[in-house]
Image (cartoon, rainbow, N blue to C red):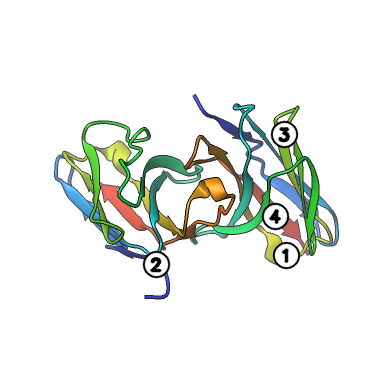
Amino acid sequence: GAGVSQSPSNKVTEKGKDVELRCDPISGHTALYWYRQRLGQGLEFLIYFQGNSAPDKSGLPSDRFSAERTGESVSTLTIQRTQQEDSAVYLCASRRGRLAGHTGELFFGEGSRLTVL
Amino acid sequence: QKEVEQNSGPLSVPEGAIASLNCTYSDRGSQSFFWYRQYSGKSPELIMSIYSNGDKEDGRFTAQLNKASQYVSLLIRDSQPSDSATYLCAVKFGSEKLVFGKGTKLTVNP
């Protein structure tokens, strides 16, 4: 597709349930990022993937959060045993090439809005 | 802890004025700095990048970087109501990690 695609766009779940969010990056983009944005707040880094390198998981807030990416394609972010504080918009972004080359443009998807009741 | 700090605002300016947005960062070794704009309910989009000390101009936007002071700013000249948005400062830490500030909400009043 032309842009970063995320699904679902909206998810309402009950506390304690597991959720899975999906991101389909722009074709050819080797880097993929997940961010969390709580209402009225900035972007909180969660994880990034770069090609076949080990992902940087330093932003994952707890062991309830995990993410996978198959090669340079789709990524899934899984939140186990959801809590009310997990309610946020989860944004996925992709980028072509390495950030070290100065190119800093991340292309963001429209986000997945998660509401935990 | 890699941190990016912004004045959360809100910042309100009249149409035609200069809007000044500021950002400080914690890592003196950072080399790449970006400004993203996020309209309400939308995703962020890149508007400026800067890597060297000094000013970089692009149309009505000027990014300013002072690495010694660990400070980066964005000036918007001749502000328009369509510039009303949240502006996010982002800093590259290490090789690939891009950390965003909390953003400054700008309102341009007609």
Measure the alpha-carbon separation of dots 2 and 4.
32 Å
Gap between marks 4 and 1, in whole Å?
7 Å
Circles 4 and 1: CB atoms closer than 8 Å? no
Q: Residue at x 47, y 42 (%)?
A: B96
Judge from the rendering whether residue A104 lies leftward or rightward of residue B57; answer left or right. left
> Residue A26, which numbered label?
2
Labels 4, 1: one chain: yes
> Which tag is nearer the camera, tag 1 or tag 2?
2
> At label 1, which amino acid type do we have?
Pro
Locate residue A114 relative to residue A96 in the image: left or right: left
Contact between labelled residues 2 and 1, with CB atoms less than 8 Å apart: no
User: Is residue A33 shown left or right of residue A116?
Assistant: right
Q: Answer yes or no: do the residues labelled 4 and 3 have beta carbons within 8 Å?
A: no
What's the mark number on residue A103? none
Identify the residue under disc 3: B71
Give the secondary structure at mark 2.
Answer: loop
Residues at discs 1 and 2 both on one chain: no
The alpha-carbon separation of the residues under discs 1 and 3 comes to 27 Å
- Measure the C-alpha gap from mark 1 to mark 2: 31 Å
- Please give the name of the residue rendered at 42% of the width and 70% of the height, measured from the top-left corner: A3
Circle 4: is it few (<14), some (14-19), or many (20+) Cα within 10 Å? Answer: many
Report x, y in % for residue A84. 27, 39
Q: Three-letter amino acid code at disc 3?
A: Tyr
Chain to which the residue tagged by mark 1 belongs: B
Which amino acid, by three-letter code, is at mark 4? Thr
Could you confirm whether marks 2 and 4 are on the same chain? no
**Residue A77 x, y percent position in the rendering:** 26, 49
Quick check: B91 above or below A97? above
Q: Which residue position holds label 4?
A: B107
Residue bearing the label numbered 1:
B81
Of the image marks 4 and 1, the number of the one nearer the N terminus: 1
Would you place residue A112 above or below residue B32 in this image?
below
